[in-house]
Image (tube, helix red, strand yellow):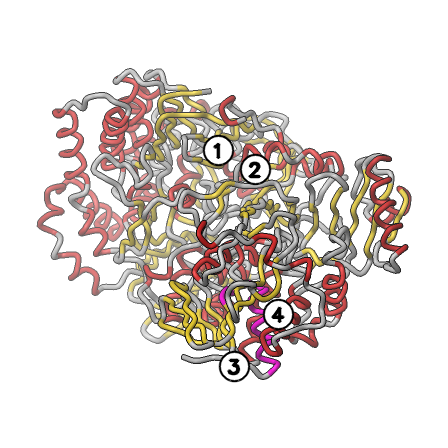
């Protein structure tokens, strides 16, 4: 869906994050929503009808990019810059609670 | 923590106000959701100006760096990646920084929270592959991400033109643009042209974008109806009806834009008076010349005060700073005020022209259309609930759950109000809006429980 | 416009009285200043609870409990009621002792709706409650309903029964002439020999207009709603000696309340949430359900409700204004009583008397000197 025109020095440092158990290279300052969009093209399944959704507004007002980031459910991934070692999962359906 | 002023938002208005307030010797805390200052318009400007993106994003983008630099040096207590989840009269601003909640007290508050793109539901708008033009532009400004084909744009307004032109400048590809604006609006807009000529540079810029797009060979589709995003799990095609004939084109991305509207959740939740902009169909807080709301000590600047664009935002930020200082007992520098007011007047010169050219769309919303993205409520269900009771969005919300999801009505609010107004045969602005229930942004129970309270709140 | 009875207040108690009066053949109108269910009825957690009721309320509460199980018969809809049971837990022996005394007292009077259960039984009933508890009182036939579905069902039934409904219709005056009340409103005058005052937080104002000044307090209990979560908790949970009410709705959201008070908005007509107070009140929730820590709060609110000196409602004829029936002051726990209190009030309106003992709800205990009004 998206591919960067930047490379080399312009691109800035790369960071490695864990996306659903796999190591994925991301860009410093890119948001998690951006990474999900590039990697899967979707972010979650809705809790009401389990329909796939992708980040829609990228600026914190649609909540379609909710993801599980470092174990924290329902995080607005468009407001979350990637950081090295971060663990990211898509949120499928109603959030689970850890008892 | 107590400061003279808390500013919410580090876009053009918030930054300009912070710089001015600091120059007046007042202490300022600036909370912003993004990792760097600039707002949406100048997002990432410090980083991007050193890359090849700078040329394509244009001089209006590049010049933001100067204000960002002044803001970083102004001595404000700047809090990036910080959400404001509640504002209480008094004034208390509730912050959430990395999952840690706290309260900042202040003598005055400036909301500089800007705008969001107007949500206009259409068939398939929830499919992955459909996103807003603004969202795609944020991808461009945060890492130089270009849309990969086939790429279609639908909608109206200056932003799709600007974005398409930026993508072309970087060697990218746009397959087609579906213009949803009504041709009749052009005649309406011409009446406002004389005033708009005060800012002929902006008009010339718009005309240049149009020329470049025409020369680019992008397929331009006009005067169509029933634009749809199609696909099963994700977008595969965009379809429309042109001269009575169904049309269909493959698409991996469909970027939509129907103008922008002020963000009003905070002022609505605080019970500030608002006025209805009938042409643009949005609410904006009622403000005095300084940007002060009907709640004394609460100010609004930037697009949150009514859509005006970046230069209007900077001018309004400056005016609000003077107004806040005045409220806190300082004398106002008359020359400064006059200069900000002249800037604002010039910046707003093209607004009546643009508003007439791109009014809020009025097409019939089919019953099957998903209006509330969070709770998945259709227009038909909302109409049914609207018919059953008083013309009040809160009643419809209670009956249907529309507006009860995590976005708190930011995507469906105006559509729900519009459907109610249509069912009851009243003017669009008379149906009101959802009561905004705090928190303004969802906060975890644990963060609330661990809230650090200021002493006077005990 | 002339009617047999005029109901002031479009909350659930007003709707229930109007419905049941109309079913008795009366010509009934209902006026609501805002829209139906705007205040307490729309802000309630909708607990259907006999558990821990004041003994004075129990006869009406047990009668209502039976109706909740066959709600279709009254309003043609289950009102989203599920008999998931209600549990009042004891976190320590002292609290358990209080529960034991209450349940044994009820049993001594021949009432068996509450049962005592031990820690193990409680654990199997609510596995998701991981905080330490020694036992609980348990009412398996209690549960919770959906407040909005309930409002809608009562409205639909009342309309079908012939009740004339006027929303956005504010009462401005009441006067009595030759055995008839003349009620002036923003939408014209209504006449009826009987007026039912079901105006919730504004009932004292209506009573004052009718020449019956009363001492009534206000309550504005706060509620928290979280995002939708996977299903984890079935019964409604409260805790002895704690301010807690905890349930999971059909949508999966968690509804957390328990009577922590918000503040009156400066317009005097609505309540606002006080986050500082709310933050301090989450201890019990976090102790019993530590996993709620990461749940997102999507919405909070504070309702507006009338409260009385001893938290018992006012139900019955005014002692000083002829033809005025009071039906308010439920002090935050009136939702379950809607069917039975509506039955009693309709009986009073139609027959002028009832066999039900209303002595505990007599307005005399909150009457003010008329001069003081």
Q: Is residue C142 visible?
A: yes
Identify the magenta region.
Answer: C8-24
Q: Which disc number belongs to residue B443?
A: 2
* Residue linked to disc 3: C27
Q: Are marks 4 and 1 in contact (CB under 8 Å)?
A: no
- Spatial CA span between label 4 and label 3: 15 Å
Query: Which subunit holds the residue at mark 4?
Result: C
Nearest to the observer: residue C208 or residue B388: C208
Query: Which subunit holds the residue at mark 2?
Result: B
Is label 2 on the same chain as label 3?
A: no
* Residue linked to disc 1: B83
* Residue linked to disc 4: C345
Q: Are marks 4 and 2 in contact (CB under 8 Å)?
A: no
- Spatial CA span between label 4 and label 2: 44 Å
B147 left or right, relative to C306: left
Sequence order check: which comes first, mark 4 or mark 3?
A: 3
Q: Nearer the viewer, mark 4 or mark 2?
A: 4
Which of the image's four quarters has the N terminus of chain C? bottom left
Give residue C364's position: percent from left, percent from top. Answer: 59, 57
Give yes or no for residue C22 being in the magenta stretch: yes
- Is the residue marked by circle 2 packed among few (<14), some (14-19), or many (20+) residues within 10 Å? many
Query: Which subunit holds the residue at mark 1?
Result: B
Is label 4 on the same chain as label 1?
A: no
Report which quarter residue B445 is drawn in. top right
Give residue C79's position: percent from left, percent from top. Answer: 65, 67
Look at the picture and state if B369 lies above or below B41: below
Q: Nearer the viewer, mark 4 or mark 1?
A: 4
Q: Nearer the viewer, mark 2 or mark 3?
A: 3
Tally of numbered tags: 4
- Spatial CA span between label 4 and label 1: 50 Å
Is label 4 on the same chain as label 3?
A: yes
């Amino acid at each position: 869906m998206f591919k960067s025109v930047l490379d080399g020095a312009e691109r800035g440092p790369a960071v490695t994050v864990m996306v659903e158990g796999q190591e994925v290279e991301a860009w410093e300052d890119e948001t998690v929503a951006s990474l999900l969009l590039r990697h899967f093209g979707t972010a979650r399944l809705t809790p009401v009808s389990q329909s796939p959704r992708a980040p829609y507004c990228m600026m914190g007002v649609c909540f379609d990019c909710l993801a599980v980031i470092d174990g924290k459910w329902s995080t607005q991934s468009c407001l979350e810059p990637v950081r090295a070692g971060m663990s990211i999962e898509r949120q499928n359906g109603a959030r689970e609670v850890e008892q | 923590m107590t400061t003279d002023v808390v500013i919410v938002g580090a876009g053009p208005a918030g930054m300009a106000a912070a710089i001015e307030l600091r120059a007046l010797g007042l202490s300022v805390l600036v909370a912003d959701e993004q990792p760097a200052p600039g707002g949406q318009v100048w997002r990432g400007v410090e980083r991007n100006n050193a890359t090849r993106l700078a040329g394509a994003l244009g001089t209006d983008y590049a010049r933001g760096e100067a204000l960002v630099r002044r803001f970083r040096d102004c001595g404000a207590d700047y809090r990036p990646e910080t959400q404001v989840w509640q504002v209480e009269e008094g004034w208390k601003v509730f912050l959430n920084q990395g999952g840690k909640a706290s309260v900042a007290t202040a003598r005055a508050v400036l909301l500089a929270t800007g705008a969001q793109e107007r949500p206009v539901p259409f068939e398939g708008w929830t499919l992955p592959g459909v996103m807003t033009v603004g969202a795609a532009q944020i991808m461009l400004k945060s890492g130089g991400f270009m849309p990969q084909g086939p790429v279609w744009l639908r909608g109206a307004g200056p932003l799709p033109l600007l974005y398409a032109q930026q993508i072309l400048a970087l060697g990218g590809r746009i397959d087609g643009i579906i213009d949803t604006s009504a041709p009749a609006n052009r005649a309406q807009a011409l009446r406002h042209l004389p005033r708009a000529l005060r800012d002929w540079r902006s008009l010339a810029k718009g005309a240049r974008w149009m020329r470049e797009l025409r020369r680019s060979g992008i397929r331009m589709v006009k005067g169509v109806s029933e634009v749809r995003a199609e696909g099963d799990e994700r977008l595969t095609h965009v379809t429309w009806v042109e001269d009575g004939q169904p049309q269909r084109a493959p698409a991996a991305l469909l970027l939509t834009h129907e103008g922008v509207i002020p963000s009003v959740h905070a002022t609505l939740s605080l019970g500030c008076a608002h006025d209805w902009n009938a042409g643009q169909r949005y609410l904006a807080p009622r403000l005095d010349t300084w940007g002060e709301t009907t709640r004394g000590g609460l100010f609004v600047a930037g697009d949150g005060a009514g859509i005006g664009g970046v230069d209007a935002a900077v001018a309004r930020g400056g005016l609000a700073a003077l107004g806040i200082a005045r409220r806190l007992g300082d004398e106002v520098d008359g020359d400064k005020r006059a200069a900000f007011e002249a800037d604002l007047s010039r910046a707003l010169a093209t607004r009546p022209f643009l508003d007439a050219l791109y009014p809020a769309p009025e097409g019939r919303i089919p019953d099957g259309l998903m209006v509330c993205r969070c709770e998945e409520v259709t227009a038909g269900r909302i109409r049914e609930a609207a018919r059953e009771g008083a013309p009040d969005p809160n009643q419809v919300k209670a009956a249907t759950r529309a507006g009860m999801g995590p976005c708190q009505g930011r995507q469906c609010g105006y559509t729900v109000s519009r459907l109610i107004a249509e069912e009851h045969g009243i003017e669009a602005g008379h149906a009101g809006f959802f009561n905004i229930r705090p928190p303004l942004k969802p906060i975890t129970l644990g963060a609330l429980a661990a809230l650090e309270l200021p002493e006077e709140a005990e | 416009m002339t009617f047999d009875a005029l109901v002031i207040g479009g909350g659930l108690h007003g709707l229930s009285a109007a419905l049941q009066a109309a079913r008795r053949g009366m010509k009934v109108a209902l006026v609501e200043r805002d829209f139906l269910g705007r205040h307490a009825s729309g802000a309630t957690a909708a607990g259907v609870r006999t558990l821990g009721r004041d003994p004075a309320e129990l006869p009406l509460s047990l009668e209502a409990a039976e109706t909740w199980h066959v709600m279709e018969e009254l309003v043609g809809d289950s009102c989203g009621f599920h008999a998931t049971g209600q549990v009042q837990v004891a976190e320590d022996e002292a609290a358990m002792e209080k529960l034991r005394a209450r349940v044994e007292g009820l049993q001594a009077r021949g009432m068996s709706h509450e049962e005592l259960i031990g820690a193990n039984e409680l654990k199997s009933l609510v596995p998701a409650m991981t905080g330490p508890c020694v036992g609980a009182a348990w009412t398996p036939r209690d549960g919770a309903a959906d407040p909005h579905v309930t409002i809608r069902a009562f409205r639909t039934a009342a309309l079908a029964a012939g009740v004339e409904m006027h929303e956005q219709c504010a009462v401005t005056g009441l006067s009595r002439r030759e055995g008839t009340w003349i009620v002036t409103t923003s939408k014209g005058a209504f006449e009826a020999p009987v007026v039912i005052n079901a105006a919730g937080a504004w009932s004292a104002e209506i009573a004052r207009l009718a020449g019956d000044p009363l001492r009534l307090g206000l309550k504005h209990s706060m509620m928290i709603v979280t995002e939708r979560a996977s299903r984890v908790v079935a019964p409604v949970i409260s805790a002895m000696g704690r301010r807690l009410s905890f349930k999971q709705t059909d949508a999966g959201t968690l509804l957390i309340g328990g009577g922590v008070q918000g503040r009156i908005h400066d317009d005097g007509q609505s309540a606002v949430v006080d986050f500082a107070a709310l933050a301090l009140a989450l201890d019990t929730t976090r102790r019993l359900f530590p996993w709620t820590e990461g749940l997102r709060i999507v919405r909070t609110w504070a309702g507006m409700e009338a409260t009385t000196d001893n938290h018992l409602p006012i139900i019955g004829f005014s002692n000083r204004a002829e033809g005025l029936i009071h039906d308010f002051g439920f002090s935050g726990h009136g939702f379950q009583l809607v069917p039975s209190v509506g039955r009693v009030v309709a009986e009073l309106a139609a027959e002028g008397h009832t066999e039900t003992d209303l002595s505990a709800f007599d307005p005399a205990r909150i009457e003010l000197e008329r001069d003081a009004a």
